[in-house]
Image (cartoon, grey):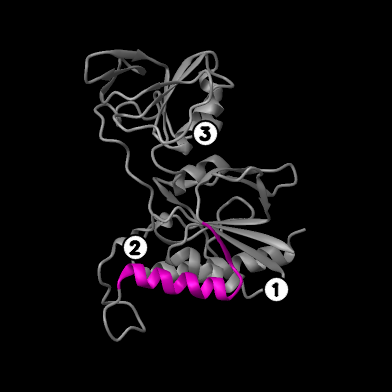
Amino acid sequence: MKKALIIGAGPAGISASLYLARNNNIDVTIVSNGQSALSRAHLIENYFGFAEPVSGEQLLENGRKNAERLGAHFLDTELIELQFTPELKFSAAFSGEKEEQVFDSVLIATGASRKDPAISGMDRFKGRGISYCAVCDAFFYRNKAAAVIGSGEYAVHEASTLSNSCSSVTILTNGEELSAKAPEGINVITAKIRELSGETTLDSVIFEDDSRLEISGLFIAIGTAGSSDIARKLGAPLDGSNIIVDKNMATAVPGLFAAGDCTGGLMQIAKAVSDGAIAGLGMIKFLSVSG
């Protein structure tokens, strides 16, 4: 039986699961941290099939129940790593799960990427010391000091990846409490950041108390891994923060699909549901011909 992973339990992800789960040869897993933007919609009046306004939370609950009825199973946790196996499949690590799982195809349906932290100097040093992918860019900071901005398991995971290459790694929570345990040897600074500093490239972080941390690289890992983070690590092309897909919602990476707000365009439920349906059918076709 082939295995499909859907990242995100919003309208795009659940829509795709409804097509995939009806195929008896495909096992469907949906991973979600419960942070769908739709859940914050108080009342929705412009969605087909409802005579009266419906809340986003109710719409999501109905979709989840339908997916579960068809056989999809949900992991209410956080995806902390997704990478290729030597067999060109996808190996996924989840928070709270001891073992990684392997999937034949993956759909990114996590919504639009989150914004950068509001810190002076962020725009100035993008590409000149600021990075969004530890596994992609750790090479450039070998034997140099690096830091990660974030306060959750995603930040800890990125810091652990960097520790294999960098001379030192520091997690900067920017005033937040660290919600995950930092590995031995990785420093943690909870002070609020005032600005980033450097001449042509980033060379230090300055905190509100005027203290300074000298670094060569700063990695952004706030919250959970976003759509563009995941796509970038697997080599899928982006247009800004939007994932580039074809008419079947397939990326340039074999077996990797994307749907919904993370692909740009009209950010409406109807469009996300349509994207999900197209992606689900595209994944079925891919899985039927893949080895």
Above or below 55: residue 244: above
The stretch of residues the image draws in magenta is 55-75
Determine the residue located farthest toward the right in the rendered image: 291
Between disc 2 and disc 1, the foreground one is 2
Residue 243 drawn in magenta: no
In what quadrant of the picture does the C terminus appear? Answer: bottom right
Three-letter amino acid code at disc 2? Answer: Ser
Above or below 199: residue 3: below
In what quadrant of the picture does the N terminus appear? Answer: bottom right
Q: Residue 246, can we see it?
A: yes
Q: Which residue is drawn at 43% across and 63% down?
A: 10
Q: Name the residue under label 2.
A: 39
Q: Is mark 3 on a helix, strand or loop?
A: helix
Q: Residue at x 56, y 76 (%)?
A: 69
Mark number displayed over residue 157: 3
**In 3D space, how far apart are the residues under numbered discs 2 and 1 (Cα atoms)?**
30 Å
Q: What element carries label 2?
A: helix
N-terminal label among 2 and 3 = 2
**In 3D space, how far apart are the residues under numbered discs 3 and 1 (Cα atoms)?**
35 Å
Q: In this view, does 21 lie to the left or right of 55?
A: right
Q: Residues within 10 Å of mark 2 (few under 14, many from 20)?
A: some
Three-letter amino acid code at disc 1? Answer: Asn
Mark number displayed over residue 24: 1
Above or below 106: residue 54: below
Q: Do the residues labelled 3 and 1 touch (CB within 8 Å)?
A: no
Q: What element carries label 1?
A: loop
**In 3D space, how far apart are the residues under numbered discs 2 and 3 (Cα atoms)?**
27 Å
Three-letter amino acid code at disc 3? Answer: His
Magenta stretch secondary structure, dominant: helix
